Image (spheres, rainbow, N blue to C red):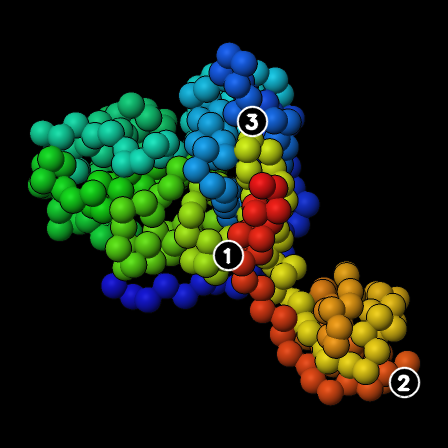
Amino acid sequence: MTEFVAPARTVLTAKEPAIEVRGVSKRYGRYPVLDNVSFQVLPGEVYALAGPNGAGKTTIIRIITGLSYPTAGKMLLCGKDVHTGGSQVRRALGAVVEAPAAFYPHMTGKENLQAHAKLAGGFGYGTDLRETLKLDENRIREVLTLVELLRMQDRIVKEYSLGQRQRLGLAAAILTNPRVLVLDEPTSGLDPLGINLVHRVLSNMAASGTAVILSTHHLREVSQYAHRVGILSSGKLLDEVDLGARSTAFRFRVDDAPRAAAALSTQPFVTRSFARSPYVIAHLDSELRAPEAIRALAVEGIRMFEANPDHFDLYEYYRERVEREF
């Protein structure tokens, strides 16, 4: 297995959201589970939902996939309501909810994917049956190779380990090349190599234009390739972290941090700056702008002693953000 290397996060252009959660609330009787949650996921974007147990992550996943109805609000996939759009909307969707995915235990992995392809209508739209079956077989072999289960394809699923069933669920979810991929804890029960493999597959799906949303507890791993992270607690979306913007933050140790922050805030390539004495933290529109930031400080007569990337620890930020709510 090759080592996972996160691809560079591309700058996403303005597009119609592939996933749009609009003011979604959910109650079970008198008990609120989600409270006015709103966010969007663009094509080609990886969006991770993080939060403590009971925060509402799986409920959001179930609403996105149409398995549960919101008490209030709307859930749109590719611009259409997932609950009223019928098969046209569902065809754009690949999902694993409440993993591991359910399979026929006495059928082989390959046979389970064949059944999945049949339910999806096959992949040879507009061709004869023989051509459709050929396309199905080729795609099944391709996805089994991607999740490193090709050698297990003729073994019955009952003999699969938990990690192997997890990977077979991912294979089923990506089988139809969906425009939207939704996964609930896709790395639960996997060893480090399995986690690495799943992350690589999801990154590649996003790179091909698929909108990916997943719930996770593996914050440090997902921060390597996710574009944004939504932090949930007690059914509310507390914060959204733009990891692409965080990766272009720099820390400068200076003699006057407040004045340095004010000076940098006037520069067009600085999206945000603030003092954290004796440092000033600057978010730049590109990491290549760091020398320009240094020159801007020098022009203002601010002495600088040190300049480094301001590495962002998603786990620590998440922990502090959630603890602040209790």
Q: Which residue corresponds to mark 2?
A: 301
10 Å crowding of disc 3: few (<14), some (14-19), many (20+)? many
Mark 3: amino acid: Leu
Q: Quadrant of residue 161?
A: top left
For the question of whether residue 99 can be seen, the reply is yes
- Residue 91: x and y, percent? 43, 27
Q: Which residue corresponds to mark 3?
A: 34
- Residue 96: x and y, percent? 35, 34
**Position of 88 compared to 13: left or right?**
left
Most extreme residue toward the right is 300
If the image is split into quadrants, where does the N terminus sit? bottom left
- Considering the numbered disc 2 on the image, is that residue within a helix, a strand or a loop? loop
**Position of 162 compared to 25: left or right?**
left
**Position of 49 compared to 191: left or right?**
right
Q: Residue at x 16, y 33 (%)?
A: 111
Q: Choose between 6 and 260: the one closer to the eye.
A: 260
For the question of whether residue 207 can be seen, the reply is no
Q: Is residue 56 above or below residue 186?
A: above
Q: CA distance from mark 2 to mark 1?
A: 37 Å
- Considering the numbered disc 1 on the image, is that residue within a helix, a strand or a loop? helix
10 Å crowding of disc 2: few (<14), some (14-19), many (20+)? few
- Residue 125: x and y, percent? 36, 28
Q: Choose between 257 and 268: the one closer to the eye.
A: 257
Q: Which residue corresponds to mark 1?
A: 315
Label whose residue precedes the other's in the sequence (3 or 1): 3
Q: CA distance from mark 3 to mark 1?
A: 23 Å
